[in-house]
Image (cartoon, grey):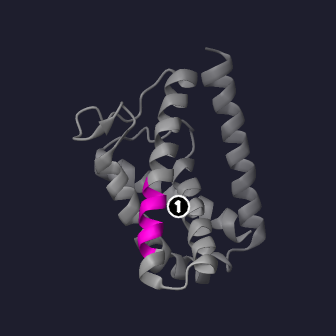
Amino acid sequence: MNYLNIFFFFSILGHMIESILTSNYTSGILYGYWTPIYGIGVIIILLLNQTLKKMVEKPWIRLVLLFFSSAVILSIMEYVGGYLIQNFFHQVFWNYSKHKGNIGLYTSLEMSLIWGISSIFVAFFIDPLCQKYSQKIPNFISYILLILFIIDCLITINNKVISF
């Protein structure tokens, strides 16, 4: 349940931040007020950090490894996500072709740097707070969010993929 709560928290928070910073009120492909790529990204960061904690004793080495591995993994995820959205939903939600060091439309070295820095911030500062509060969310709220999310995914697939 903890990871499910964290997934929803960051999916909603990511949607909110993106809507404010980019004035893109259509953040993501789903109808609900969440952008799952952020929730998935944070879960990846947390799992990666836990794995590194078990494997690497020195905190500064773990920090460097987390930075680079998160930058690479999240950039690949962003690239694949952008490619899939364009091919399945026939929409482009982000375009980094004007960024220095762009890698096609969907990612750039600049964004990789942002993902690396964000992963350290999430793993070392935000996660301890989230762990404390995410476990206090009643299970029925998590289940309601999950059901709404599944319904949203099914409606999106029906309206945007199948009917296209």
Which residue carries the number 1 mark? 10
Instruction: Please indicate, yes or no, whether residue 34 appears anywhere in the rendered image.
Output: no
Residue 61 locus on image (x, y percent): 44, 77
Instruction: Please indicate, yes or no, whether residue 50 appears anywhere in the rendered image.
Output: yes
The mark tally for this picture is 1
Q: Quadrant of residue 151?
A: top right
Which one is nearer the viewer's eye here, 112 or 159?
112
Q: Is residue 57 above or below residue 55?
A: below
Which one is nearer the viewer's eye here, 12 or 54?
54
Residue 26 locus on image (x, y percent): 43, 38
* Quadrant location, the N terminus: bottom right
As helix, strand or loop, the secondary structure at mark 1 comes to helix
Q: Residue furthest top?
A: 164
The residue stretch that appears in magenta:
63-71
**Residue pictured at 56% horizontal, 79% vertical:** 56
Amino acid carrying label 1: it is Phe
